[in-house]
Amino acid sequence: MALTKFEIAQRIAKELKNGYYVNLGIGIPTLISNYIPNDISVIMQSENGLLGMGPFPKKENVDADLINAGKETITTLDGSSLFDSAESFAMIRRGRVNLTVLGAMEVSQNGDISNWKIPGKMVKGMGGAMDLVASAKNIIVAMMHTNKQGESKLLSNCTLPITGIKCVKKVVTNLAVIDVVNSQFVLKERAPGVTTQEIVSATEGDLLVPEFVPEMNF
Amino acid sequence: MNKVFKNADEAIFDVENNNTIMLGGFGLCGIPENLISALVKKGSNGLTCISNNAGVDDFGIGLLLKTRQVKKMISSYVGENAEFERQLLSGELAVDLIPQGTLAERCRAAGAGIPAFYTPAGVGTEIAENKEVKIFNNQEYLLEYAFESDFAFVKAWKGDHLGNLIYRGTARNFNPMMAAAGKITIVEVEELVPTGTLDPNHIHTPSVYVDRIFEGKNYEKRIEKMTIQ
């Protein structure tokens, strides 16, 4: 069975390590905060100026001056800090944010990512994505393996305008966990019940398939 | 030295058509509500606005778009605004989309007297077109320039008569860098207090950057996406 978006988030949560500072993009990545293992502590960065992002507020604690980068109302935690947008991107460029997880429309086998623009259709802008992918040391993409037309989103070359080059290290989709190594995709894990052949045929870019590919566990 | 103005209408007396104005805020959080309303009332047009976002259809910079006062937006993300998209696709509005960290740093540089800087954001993408690329430690960087602007419209939580400012929560965002960058910086605060009542240890923006200050009124502080547990 292919994973749901919740299960994709759950699988990525296993990549978190104790003490990590993490920036989660909008969409599936946001769900990851629901699956952080109890025995580790991670600190969420929101690029609009908050380290130590807490859960959504209770109704009586909603504060218009406290939002995340997706413009949702949120809370602070013990140990949180607030700062301006220049400081926020300074710590990102400095490489102090250990992990960035974001969604994508396309990923190429050399680690390029496209997620900000569909020419002639979508003109919303890149927000902080270009800064994040240019500087984060570890970037994981969370996305569906194919688009709504059933076409592969893991390509030899991106066809949409690029957000960043040679930056994606790992892709977790509804079908598989795939690493980007030496300009090629490497199949690491299969979603439970999904065959290697299904993954191969849903992947347009070069995919290295080891002899044994384990199923994911959560 | 008197920096205190009665209200937004008086504080923007010298804004002219075709001016470039920086406006603080992220989404609808920390936007200069009173100054935007006054600008709508004043009717100045042909404006270039530097702001991370463009508001929503009926609030924030969206109000200035509706009245066609904006000629060009310089932003990082402009979703959530149907009128914006319509004007953009019809060619009435020019838009310069800039990575958010670069936008912040171009404001910061302007406020710090630095004419330009190198950043890795956007290398290899279409925003790198026609930009100088330089290699440091085997990595490519783009040359980006400090913004020039006629005015900065800033929203702070508290300010004193001298112009010392304190922001609150994530409403800080772009406001401090814009406060430092504006050729003329106009600040609206929720609470204007006598000089000497704010703890110097807690000041975010020192008074030196602020030219005009007033206490805003009728803050709506609209929430774009109310999310609760």
Image (cartoon, grey):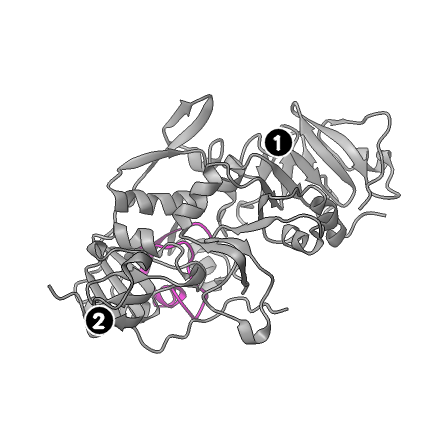
Q: Position of residue A205 (x, y in %)?
A: 71, 30
**Residue A69 visible from this viewpoint:** no
Quadrant (top left/top right/bottom left/bottom right) for the C terminus of chain B: bottom right
Q: The residue tagged with tag 1: helix, strand or loop?
A: loop
Q: Secondary structure at mark 2?
A: loop
- Front residue of this view, candidates A118 and B219: B219
Q: Which residue is mark 2?
A: B194
Using the rendered view, name the quadrant where residue B136 is placed: top left
Tag 1: amino acid = Gly
User: Residue at left 79%, top 42%?
Assistant: A175
**A117 sits to left or right of B83:** right
**Mark 2, residues whose alpha carbon is within 10 Å: few (<14), some, or many (≥20)?**
few
| Residue type marked 2 | Pro
Do the residues at discs 2 and 1 belong to one chain?
no
Q: What residue is shown with label 1?
A: A111
Instruction: Assign the N terminus of chain B to one quadrant of the image.
Output: bottom left
Relative depth, front residue between B70 and A19: A19
Which residue range is magenta in the image? B49-77
Q: Chain of mark 1?
A: A
Where residue A164 sits: x, y (%)?
53, 35
